[in-house]
Structure formats: structure tokens, C-alpha cells
Image (cartoon, rainbow, N blue to C red):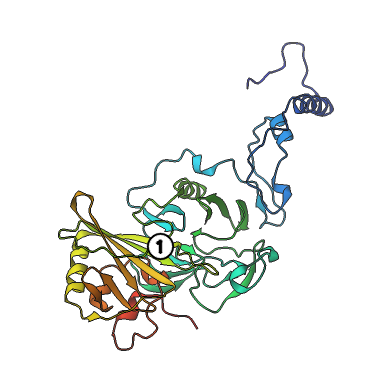
Amino acid sequence: MVEERPGPGRTDPTDDELEQLMRAGLAERAGQVDTDVPVPVNRSRSRRWVLPAAVAAAVGILVVGALVVPDGNVPVPPSDDRTRVANPPAPSDWRWESWHGVQVSVPPDWGWGGAPSPPEEFGESARSGNLYDCGMAAYRSADGKPVQDAALPYVGRPIMMTDACSVVHDQDLPQPTAPYAWLGASLEPGTRDLGGGWQQTTVKVGGSTVTVATKDDALRERILSTARANPGTDCEAELGERTVSDFTVDDPTGMSVCAYRRTEGSNGFPLQYATEVDAASTRTFLAAIDSAPKLQCIDSYTDEWVVLRIHGKEGKTQVVLVDTGDCIGIHAAKGTAELNVATTSPWAVDGIPAYVIGPRDTSEVPGLSDYFRGILG
């Protein structure tokens, strides 16, 4: 657009003249809009967020400036596609975080914790507007150590970190004390001013959501720009057939750790968390299950599985299943190995202790509880 400036002998138009010109232009251009053409819109709960297609097409003006929100914590319109922001790629030392069908990259020193849980998990209607805070803070540090630190940046999932839950209305989220990225939070797309310089933005990706809150606009946009559908790890977004390989990889190059948990009211097992283990740890694991006591198990019915995909040369992958709830053990080609510290420590790393529930009784296996979240209540 070329800006027209007053020429010699001309005077600037008055405010009334500008308003009349703009109204006329809007009326003329609105009449040219084909309102029968469907326009994809990420709809929110409040129609105040959505600009009608005819008016949006007619205006054609980019407004640059600050949006003043009187009450602070009120959503404002999302951009058309925040994943297209022209940010530089994430630094090579950032790590990938996976949840259901979405993945996002975050700084390596962020911990792991909770995100607001939806009302359906507590017997309420989705229209109640309530969310549940069951640990919206870091509960594991970046090195996997247990913490409960509201001042530590973290990645959160709607998984209960504690059973001491409190109700939070989705329009009244608390002001953060540290940056966070929430995966799967039941929030509408858009940006909220949480006060004190904190801005929270939610986007929909891969059938789920990514929510980032920081005081640093560049950091927030950089994280959101990495969000993508379908996990980029070797872990499927939902666990399919649960079978183990009938062979063993002799010279492993590494291992993918994929944690799945049954969803409420469904037999599906969506991905909760994924990480990678190096070749040395993978060899240690294979040696441990070879020497571990073997168990006799029947068919297992459990709410949680950890799938270990052991990679070999020439694209060969061995699949091993871990059951921590029913037929407790590691199901592999050579039988079911006992779940103990030696067979667990090589793969229960990073965020696994934050999200995977361990066996109900670990009293006879000293140290095993350190590698799992534990049962609440």
C-alpha cells in the first residue's frame, strides 16, 4: 500500500472527513466480498474474538499497536497461524516434548510438571468453564530429580501431580511465577494478559493444544513456532497392537521410550511422553533384562504401557513392553524380566519419573520408586 500525502495547496482532512471516507470505503468493499465462500476460523467460546469475514476482507488494514484490556486476564484474538512466525529454528540443545498428536521444542533446563485438567475428568460438563489445578508447577527438574518448585520453568501436561486439586475458572488463570509450556490444556486459542507482564498464548496443533506463558515475547513465539502435528520421535501418537518382537537387536544404536496411558472412558492409549536413550544405556538395559529373574505372566490388562523401541543397524527395531500395573515386568523376546532398578534405570530417565505411575508396592525393591511418579491418594 502506498501512503498518499497532501500535495501543495492541500490541507489534511478533518477527523469527520476521514470517518466518512473510511465508512464509504468499507461499504463499497464489503459489497464486493463473496460471503458464500467458507472462511476457516478457529472459533472461540466468545464471539467477540471473531471478526466477521465480510468486515475482515473489507477493512484490509494492518493495525500495529497495543491492545488495552481493562480486566487483564481476557483472551484476545489469535493470529491467523502462529506456527508460521518467521523465527529462527530452535537451538540445537533444545529438547522435544510430545503429547498425544503434538510435539514442541523447549529449552533444555525446563523441568516437567502439570497443566490444568479438564472438568470432564471430575464429572463436570465441559461447558462449566472450570479447570482443575492438580499441580500446575514443576515437579521434576531437568535432570529428573523430584522438586515442587513454582519458580522453575517447566513443561506441563494435564496429568495429576497431586490429588490436592483446586478449581480454577478458565477465564481466571493465576499469574505465573515462571515460564511454562502446557501440552493438551483445555484452553481456547488466543492470547491472554495474565498481568505483571505475563502473556499466555494457546494454539491448536495436531488435534491438541500448545500453551506458552512468558514475559519474553520472542521466547514465546520461538517455542510456538516449533509446534507441529504428529510426534517427530519414533513413538506413535496412539499405541496400537501391543506385541513384542520375537528377536533381539545385537548391536543397538539407541532406544526410543514411549509412555502411553489409557484415556478416561476409552480403550485408547494416547502418547503421554517420549524421550530417547543412547546406545550405551540401551546395551546396559539389554544386558540387565537378560540376567534378571524371569516371571510367569498371563494376559495383562493395564492402564499404562511403556514401549521401548530398540534400534539396530540397517533399520531393524526390536519392540519391548513394560507393564507397571498388572503383570509387572518387562516383556521381551526372551520372556518377562523382573522390574527392578537394573532393568528400569537405563530407560526411566528425563520426564519418565514425572509422568509414569510405578508399581503399587515397591517396598521389596529398594530404590525402584525413585523412577516413577507414584500412585496418588
Q: Which residue is mark 1?
A: 273
Image point (68%, 64%), residue name: 129
Image point (42%, 69%), residue name: 355
Image point (17%, 73%), residue name: 290
Rendered-image quadrant of the N terminus: top right
User: In front: 159, or 13?
Assistant: 159
User: In front: 15, or 336?
Assistant: 336
User: In front: 376, or 263?
Assistant: 263
Direction from residue 343 to residue 175 in the image, left or right: right
Q: Amino acid at mark 1?
A: Tyr
Report the residue that reaches farthest toward the top.
Answer: 8
Q: Quadrant of residue 139?
A: bottom left
Find numbered disc 1 in the image and state the secondary structure of the residue it sits on: strand
Quick one: label 1, few (<14), some, or many (20+) residues within 10 Å?
many
Q: Is residue 214 visible?
A: no
* x, y percent for residue 160: 50, 72
User: In front: 355, or 317?
Assistant: 317
Direction from residue 249 to residue 233 in the image, left or right: right
* x, y percent for residue 117: 56, 67
Q: Is residue 186 visible?
A: yes
Q: Is residue 333 above or below residue 51?
A: below
* x, y percent for residue 42: 63, 46
